[in-house]
Image (cartoon, grey):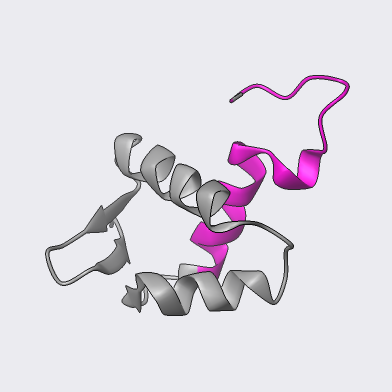
Amino acid sequence: MLIPTKHENLSLNVLVLGADLLKAMKGQLHNVESLFAEIRLQKELTIDIYFDVLAFLWLSDLIEIDERTYVRRKK
């Protein structure tokens, strides 16, 4: 769910994880796998949640994902 409820763990919310991913990117070009490895050092998340967050950021037009599986922060 996008909006956190009082029973939800905030560290695994899509909005919080999206902010963490954007902070980890800082305008750099990342491979999907290397970005997952980097964020896994900070947070305990599954690959399913990670792809949900990437989809949310892409649909929100905050990141770009090209055909070579690189993730880039929108300027």
Q: Residue at x 62, y 50 (%)?
A: 17
The image shows residue 44 at horizontal and vertical percentages of: 74, 62
Q: Residue at x 23, y 58 (%)?
A: 65
> Up-down: is 10 above or below 47?
above
Q: Main secondary structure of the magenta part?
A: helix
Q: Residue at x 47, y 73 (%)?
A: 35
The magenta segment: 2-24
Q: Residue at x 35, y 46 (%)?
A: 62
Front-most of residues 27 and 59: 59
Horizontal side of residue 9 vs 65, given as left or right: right
Residue 34: name its quadrant. Answer: bottom left
The image shows residue 10 at horizontal and vertical percentages of: 79, 39
Magenta-span inclusion, residue 55 = no
Magenta-span inclusion, residue 22 = yes
> Up-down: is 17 above or below 39?
above
- Residue situated furthest left in the rendering: 67
Residue 70: name its quadrant. Answer: bottom left
The image shows residue 19 at horizontal and vertical percentages of: 58, 51
Horizontal side of residue 17 vs 26, given as left or right: right
Q: How many marks?
A: 0
Horizontal side of residue 62 vs 36, given as left or right: left
Quadrant showing the C terminus: bottom left
> Up-down: is 63 above or below 13?
below
Front-most of residues 9 and 61: 9
